[in-house]
Image: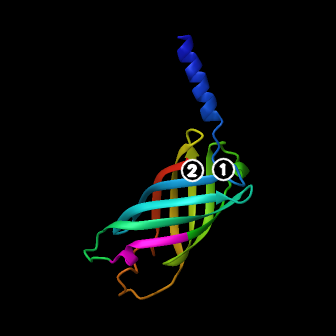
Protein backbone atom coordinates (compact mmCIF):
# COMPACT_ATOMS: atom_id res chain seq x y z
CA UNK A 1 0.00 0.00 0.00
CA UNK A 2 2.88 2.37 0.81
CA UNK A 3 4.43 1.73 -2.62
CA UNK A 4 1.10 2.46 -4.33
CA UNK A 5 0.74 5.70 -2.38
CA UNK A 6 4.32 6.70 -3.25
CA UNK A 7 3.74 6.01 -6.96
CA UNK A 8 0.49 8.02 -6.89
CA UNK A 9 2.23 10.97 -5.21
CA UNK A 10 5.12 10.93 -7.69
CA UNK A 11 2.73 10.70 -10.63
CA UNK A 12 0.61 13.59 -9.36
CA UNK A 13 3.73 15.70 -8.81
CA UNK A 14 4.90 14.87 -12.33
CA UNK A 15 1.53 15.84 -13.81
CA UNK A 16 1.25 18.97 -11.67
CA UNK A 17 4.63 20.19 -12.92
CA UNK A 18 3.75 19.94 -16.59
CA UNK A 19 3.45 23.24 -18.37
CA UNK A 20 1.66 23.99 -21.62
CA UNK A 21 3.92 26.83 -22.81
CA UNK A 22 7.17 27.79 -21.13
CA UNK A 23 8.13 30.81 -23.25
CA UNK A 24 11.38 31.41 -25.11
CA UNK A 25 12.89 28.18 -26.43
CA UNK A 26 9.72 26.13 -25.91
CA UNK A 27 9.24 23.54 -28.68
CA UNK A 28 6.03 21.70 -29.57
CA UNK A 29 5.39 19.00 -32.15
CA UNK A 30 1.76 18.17 -32.95
CA UNK A 31 0.05 15.62 -35.14
CA UNK A 32 -3.61 14.94 -35.68
CA UNK A 33 -6.64 14.88 -37.91
CA UNK A 34 -7.82 17.71 -40.15
CA UNK A 35 -11.60 17.83 -40.59
CA UNK A 36 -13.27 20.10 -43.13
CA UNK A 37 -16.32 20.11 -45.35
CA UNK A 38 -15.99 17.39 -48.04
CA UNK A 39 -12.46 16.41 -46.94
CA UNK A 40 -10.46 14.98 -44.07
CA UNK A 41 -6.76 14.54 -43.69
CA UNK A 42 -3.58 14.65 -41.67
CA UNK A 43 -2.27 17.72 -39.82
CA UNK A 44 1.37 17.97 -38.66
CA UNK A 45 3.18 20.96 -37.19
CA UNK A 46 5.91 22.48 -35.06
CA UNK A 47 5.90 25.61 -32.86
CA UNK A 48 8.92 27.37 -31.36
CA UNK A 49 8.67 29.90 -28.52
CA UNK A 50 10.36 33.25 -29.22
CA UNK A 51 9.16 35.07 -26.12
CA UNK A 52 7.13 34.74 -22.97
CA UNK A 53 3.82 34.79 -24.84
CA UNK A 54 4.47 34.26 -28.53
CA UNK A 55 5.71 31.55 -30.83
CA UNK A 56 6.23 30.92 -34.52
CA UNK A 57 5.92 27.67 -36.38
CA UNK A 58 5.15 25.67 -39.45
CA UNK A 59 2.08 23.56 -40.12
CA UNK A 60 1.19 21.20 -42.96
CA UNK A 61 -2.07 19.56 -43.91
CA UNK A 62 -2.71 16.86 -46.47
CA UNK A 63 -6.31 16.04 -47.49
CA UNK A 64 -6.54 12.26 -47.74
CA UNK A 65 -10.27 11.80 -48.19
CA UNK A 66 -11.86 14.22 -50.66
CA UNK A 67 -15.62 13.54 -50.84
CA UNK A 68 -16.73 15.40 -53.95
CA UNK A 69 -15.69 12.62 -56.33
CA UNK A 70 -13.08 14.62 -58.21
CA UNK A 71 -9.55 13.20 -58.21
CA UNK A 72 -7.39 15.95 -56.74
CA UNK A 73 -3.71 16.41 -57.55
CA UNK A 74 -1.09 16.38 -54.78
CA UNK A 75 -0.73 20.17 -55.05
CA UNK A 76 -4.48 20.58 -54.42
CA UNK A 77 -4.45 18.26 -51.39
CA UNK A 78 -1.29 19.68 -49.76
CA UNK A 79 -0.98 22.95 -47.82
CA UNK A 80 1.98 24.42 -45.94
CA UNK A 81 1.64 27.30 -43.46
CA UNK A 82 3.97 29.62 -41.59
CA UNK A 83 2.26 30.60 -38.32
CA UNK A 84 2.41 33.09 -35.47
CA UNK A 85 0.77 32.33 -32.10
CA UNK A 86 -0.06 34.52 -29.11
CA UNK A 87 0.18 32.02 -26.23
CA UNK A 88 -2.25 33.24 -23.57
CA UNK A 89 -2.18 30.35 -21.08
CA UNK A 90 -0.19 32.17 -18.41
CA UNK A 91 -2.11 35.42 -19.00
CA UNK A 92 -5.49 33.75 -18.48
CA UNK A 93 -4.08 31.69 -15.59
CA UNK A 94 -6.77 28.98 -15.91
CA UNK A 95 -4.42 26.04 -15.36
CA UNK A 96 -0.66 25.62 -15.76
CA UNK A 97 -1.32 22.72 -18.12
CA UNK A 98 -3.68 24.71 -20.40
CA UNK A 99 -2.76 27.10 -23.21
CA UNK A 100 -5.10 29.11 -25.45
CA UNK A 101 -3.42 30.48 -28.57
CA UNK A 102 -5.00 32.64 -31.26
CA UNK A 103 -2.82 33.33 -34.26
CA UNK A 104 -2.31 34.14 -37.91
CA UNK A 105 -0.95 31.97 -40.70
CA UNK A 106 0.34 32.51 -44.21
CA UNK A 107 -0.09 29.43 -46.38
CA UNK A 108 0.25 28.27 -49.96
CA UNK A 109 -3.55 28.54 -50.31
CA UNK A 110 -4.51 31.63 -48.26
CA UNK A 111 -3.85 34.09 -45.47
CA UNK A 112 -5.79 32.97 -42.43
CA UNK A 113 -6.28 32.75 -38.73
CA UNK A 114 -6.55 30.07 -36.11
CA UNK A 115 -7.64 29.66 -32.51
CA UNK A 116 -6.36 26.67 -30.61
CA UNK A 117 -6.09 25.14 -27.18
CA UNK A 118 -3.64 22.66 -25.68
CA UNK A 119 -3.83 20.66 -22.49
CA UNK A 120 -0.86 18.68 -21.18
CA UNK A 121 -1.35 15.56 -19.06
CA UNK A 122 2.38 15.20 -18.39
CA UNK A 123 5.60 17.09 -19.10
CA UNK A 124 5.80 15.68 -22.62
CA UNK A 125 2.30 14.72 -23.79
CA UNK A 126 -0.97 16.55 -24.31
CA UNK A 127 -3.90 17.04 -26.64
CA UNK A 128 -4.83 19.97 -28.83
CA UNK A 129 -7.73 21.27 -30.84
CA UNK A 130 -7.61 24.11 -33.33
CA UNK A 131 -10.08 25.94 -35.56
CA UNK A 132 -8.66 27.47 -38.75
CA UNK A 133 -10.31 29.88 -41.16
CA UNK A 134 -9.24 31.85 -44.26
CA UNK A 135 -9.17 35.63 -44.10
CA UNK A 136 -8.02 36.20 -47.70
CA UNK A 137 -8.00 33.59 -50.47
CA UNK A 138 -5.40 33.76 -53.24
CA UNK A 139 -7.90 32.78 -55.92
CA UNK A 140 -11.62 33.23 -56.42
CA UNK A 141 -11.70 30.73 -59.30
CA UNK A 142 -14.39 28.29 -58.14
CA UNK A 143 -13.69 26.07 -61.16
CA UNK A 144 -10.16 25.43 -59.83
CA UNK A 145 -9.92 21.85 -58.53
CA UNK A 146 -8.22 22.88 -55.28
CA UNK A 147 -10.34 25.95 -54.50
CA UNK A 148 -12.48 24.36 -51.80
CA UNK A 149 -9.78 22.28 -50.12
CA UNK A 150 -7.99 24.28 -47.38
CA UNK A 151 -9.97 27.45 -48.23
CA UNK A 152 -12.72 26.95 -45.67
CA UNK A 153 -13.30 26.59 -41.96
CA UNK A 154 -11.51 23.48 -40.65
CA UNK A 155 -10.90 21.79 -37.30
CA UNK A 156 -7.69 20.04 -36.26
CA UNK A 157 -7.55 17.69 -33.30
CA UNK A 158 -4.77 15.45 -32.05
CA UNK A 159 -1.75 14.93 -29.82
CA UNK A 160 0.97 17.44 -28.91
CA UNK A 161 4.45 16.69 -27.59
CA UNK A 162 7.09 18.81 -25.86
CA UNK A 163 10.52 18.47 -27.48
Secondary structure under badge 2?
A: strand
- At label 2, counting other C-alpha atoms closer than 10 Å, the crowd grade (few under 14, some 14-19, many 20 or more) is many
Apparent side of residue 146 relative to residue 96 in the rendered image (left or right)? left
Q: Does the segment drawn in magenta span residue 16?
A: no
Locate residue 12, reporting x and y percent: 60, 28
Residue 80 counted in the magenta span: yes
Q: What is the span of residues highlighted in magenta in the rendered image? A: 73-81
Query: Residue at 60% across / 64% down in the picture?
Result: 57
Indicate whether 95 appears above or below 78.
above
Residue 36 is situated, as x and y percent measured from the top left of the image, at: 40, 66
Question: What residue do we see at 56% from left, 58% from top?
Answer: 116
Where is residue 118? Give x, y as percent.
Answer: 57, 50
User: Looking at the rendering, which quadrant does residue 18 occupy?
Assistant: top right
Q: Secondary structure at mark 1?
A: loop
Instruction: Determine which of the numbered discs, if any, sits on residue 118 in the image.
Output: 2
Q: Is residue 21 above or below residue 70?
A: above
> Which tag, 1 or 2, sits closer to the chain's start?
1
* Label annotation for residue 21: 1
Q: How many marks?
A: 2
The residue lying toward the viewer, choosing from 105 and 3, is: 3
Amino acid sequence: MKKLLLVAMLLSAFIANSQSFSGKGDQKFFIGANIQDNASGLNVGYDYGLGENFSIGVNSTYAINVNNGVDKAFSDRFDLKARFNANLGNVLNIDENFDLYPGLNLSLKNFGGHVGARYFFSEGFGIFTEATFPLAKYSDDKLDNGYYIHNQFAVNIGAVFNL
